Image: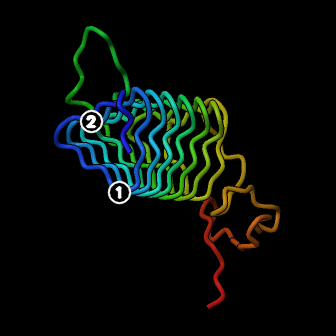
Amino acid sequence: MIHETARVDEGCAIGAGTKVWHFSHILSGSVIGANCTIGQNVMIGPDVTIGDGCKIQNNVSLYKGLRLGNNVFCGPSAVFTNVANPRAEISRKDEFQPTVVEDGVTIGANATIVCGVTLGTYSFIGAGAVVTRDVAPFALVAGVPAQPMGWVGHAGERLDSNLVCPRSGRRYREAQPGVLEEITDE
């Protein structure tokens, strides 16, 4: 479903079941997976890759060099940069830095993601945070600049002191300092 006010340039691929809402613009070379929701006034591209099941809320711009994994949530007005030190009078299009958002990441409203970082699987970026460096999988970060505040599980719930998800009961352990992994009964 593409709303009549949305614009999709030639050379884009949009997966089955994806919805593109009011006044959004998908630029050429962008690939959007299946069953995504693209909110109002979203700009994607050029040459952005978005996995399946992503939800991009209103007023988000996703620039060249950005890759979102599957099931990523971008809150309203989240900001992604594409150059580390922009100046209006200096063209730096050849300096765009890639940014990788791995599967299952949640990015809160008005968070800023500085280019060149990787947001690890199932990490959770608090609303208004400014992310200036890589975020570990399952890490909860918040603040300016973003700092680790704890851990979250697959369900997005903050883990208790025993590293157990209060929603799902899934259990985790710190494999080494700053590295969380799920405990599976094999």
Q: Which residue is mark 2?
A: 8
**Element assignment for label 2:** strand
Q: Residue drawn at (26%, 8%), measured in percent from left and top?
A: 89
- 153 sits to left or right of 63: right
Residue 127 image-quadrant placement = top right
Residue 87 rendering spot, x and y as whole percentages: 33, 13
Instruction: State yes or no: discs 2 and 1 in contact (Cβ < 8 Å).
Output: no
Residue 67's place in the image compared with 23, above or below, is below
Task: Between residue 143 and residue 9, name the one nearer to us.
Answer: 9
At label 1, the amino acid type is: Ala
Task: Between residue 21 and residue 145, name the one nearer to us.
Answer: 21
For residue 16, the mark is: 1
Residue 146 rendering spot, x and y as whole percentages: 61, 37
At label 2, the amino acid type is: Val
Residue 180's place in the image compared with 76, above or below, is below
**Element assignment for label 1:** loop
Extreme-bottom residue of the structure = 186
Q: How far apart in space, not on screen, are marks 2 and 1 (Cα)?
A: 15 Å
Q: Earlier in the sequence, mark 2 or mark 1?
A: 2
Task: Between residue 138 and residue 71, name the one nearer to us.
Answer: 71
Residue 71's place in the image compared with 45, above or below, is below
Residue 165 image-quadrant placement = bottom right
Quadrant (top left/top right/bottom left/bottom right) for the N terminus: top left
